[in-house]
Every structure is written in C-alpha cells, then in structure tokens.
Amino acid sequence: MEIIILKDAQAGSEVGGKIVANLINEKPNAVLGLATGSTPVMLYNEMIKWHKEKGLDFSKVRTFNLDEYIGLEKNHYASYYRFMNENLFDEINIPEENKNIPNGLAENIKQHCLDYEAKIVEEGGIDLQVLGIGSDGHLGFNEPTSSLASRTRIKTLDEQTRDDNKRFMKDGDPVPYHCITMGMGTVMDAKTNLLFAFGENKADAVQQMVEGAISAMCPGSALQMHPNAIIILDEAAAAKLSKADYYKWVYNNKPKWQTY
Ligand code: GLP
C-alpha cells in the first residue's frame, strides 16, 4: 500500500486527478472503476477541470461503477446513475455507451450481476478503480463480513451505512435496504486501486484498513493484499495511523521518476 497523507481533501483530490489524467494520457481507452458518495466529488471536479482546461479526452474511456441501490428509478434524486451524471458524466466527453452502472431495477438481478462481471472482463479489466471507504470499513457496498473473494451481487446494507447515507435522502425517504455491488474479488482484480478518505469520521476505518489485521470485518483491509493500492488521506483521516510520520517521509522523498 502506498499511503499519501496531504493537508486536506483538495490537495488529495488534485493528486488523484493527476493520477487519473496520467493514466488516460498513457492509455486513452483506459477502463475506470468509479465510486459514489461525497468523497470522490472533488476528484471528479479535478477530472472535469483536466477535461475543460487541459483537453483531457474521455471519448475512448470506459467506466464501471461500483454499486447502485435496488429499487430506485434511474433518475431518482438518490440513484447513483443520477449522481454520476450530475457529478461527472454530464461535464466530460464520455459516450453514453461507454458507461456502465449496475441496474438496480434489473428483473433478473442474479443474471445482471453475472453479465456485469463478464462485461468488465470483456473490456479488458479495470485499469484503475476509484474508491471511498465507509465508516464501517466497507468498499462499494461490501459491508463487514462480506467475503473478501466476493463478486458482483446483491447485498443488504448495514444499519450504520443506512444511517450514514440518510443525508442523501429527502423528506424522510428511507435509504434502500438492498443494493448491487461489485464484490471484493472484483475490486481486487483492478490493476490499480485508488482510495480516498477524508475527515475524522473515517479515522477508525482507515486505521483498520491500513494497519489492522486483514479481516472481513473491515473489507477495506483486503487492499493490504493488493499489489498496487494507493491510499490518499487528509490529516484528519490519518490521525489514528501509528506510522503516519513514516508514510509522510516516504512520500516526500520519492525519487522523481516515481512521483505523480
Ligand atoms: C457509500 C458508497 C461507497 C462510499 C461510502 C462512503 O455507501 N457505496 O462507495 O465509499 O458510502 O461515502 P462518503 O464518501 O460519502 O463518506
């Protein structure tokens, strides 16, 4: 794991934007795995800036989103389909047919999940997966006790996650109980995983993920087994890491060819 601790979410998102831009410049038809939640919004703003100000071309990029709620219409205000359009896709030049988001209204969910996995393989696999982390250590919607080898499937949300995500709902609408999510095995197959965590309410999950034992109780800890996981944190999210000074030294003393 490469742990990058920066002063705030903006600085972290700028580095993240550069990592994504470098990949797309090197491989214009890169396959990106994308995430929702409040954390990647600043990264998406950086990607939009790269597109609008520096001409970064998304016309050949393909994307796969991590997850979607079951039962919400595509254009429901809280659907991840709508989130992605509003926060990224409407502002860049990615063709409609290149975007993939699990369909929470699929009639045959089991088959839909198998097809989603097959399509990722067909497109050559995910080059770079963007991730946030839930306060209970979940990635995508892989809640604690999710198999660390799981594939795209239906999941039931943990009460803590439903509670955390209440802020995205209006007029007392309930957070759905069910979702479709890529599995931990799917995430682990990505060539690079790029995870962002900002704010003090992520400090415990980050500590477990980076320095705790590998355990299905903190699905994020599976990234300890990933050969290319980059974890970008602000000071608050890094506050409980015992080796924070070491991670900072390493980052600040990288050879030039290894910097972003
Ligand atoms: C949601 C998403 C995750 C996200 C997590 C954290 O449940 N399914 O992909 O990482 O919440 O969200 P936030 O970034 O808003 O803290």
Image (cartoon, helix red, strand yellow):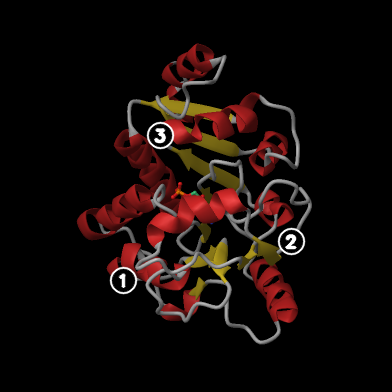
Q: For the residues marked 3 and 1, what is the alpha-carbon distance in whole angstroms?
A: 28 Å
**Quadrant (top left/top right/bottom left/bottom right) for the C terminus:** top left
Q: Is mark 3 within 8 Å of ligand 1?
A: yes
Q: Is residue 128 visible?
A: no
Q: Is mark 1 within 8 Å of ligand 1?
A: no
For marks 1 and 2, give the one nearer the viewer.
2
Q: Are marks 3 and 1 in contact (CB under 8 Å)?
A: no
Out of 163 and 76, give the one closest to the viewer: 163
x 78%, y 51%: residue: 147
x 68%, y 43%: residue: 219
Out of 212 and 233, give the one closest to the viewer: 212
Q: Is residue 66 above or below residue 232?
A: below
For marks 3 and 1, give the one nearer the viewer.
3
> Hey, which quadrant is residue 220 in on the image?
top right
The label shown at residue 126 is: none
Q: Badge 2 local density, few (<14 within 10 Å), some, or many (20+)?
A: many
x 74%, y 74%: residue: 114
Q: For the residues marked 3 and 2, what is the alpha-carbon distance in whole angstroms?
A: 29 Å
Give coordinates of residue 200: x percent, y percent. Answer: 43, 30
Q: Amino acid at mark 2?
A: Arg
Give coordinates of residue 45: x percent, y percent. Answer: 29, 53
Q: Is residue 66 above or below residue 161?
A: below
> Hey, which quadrant is residue 69 in on the image?
bottom right
Residue annotated with mark 3: 199
Helix, strand or loop at label 2? It is loop
Give coordinates of residue 204: x percent, y percent. Answer: 56, 30
Q: Is residue 68 visible?
A: yes
Q: Badge 3 local density, few (<14 within 10 Å), some, or many (20+)?
A: some
Helix, strand or loop at label 1? It is helix
The label shown at residue 90 is: 1
Residue annotated with mark 2: 151
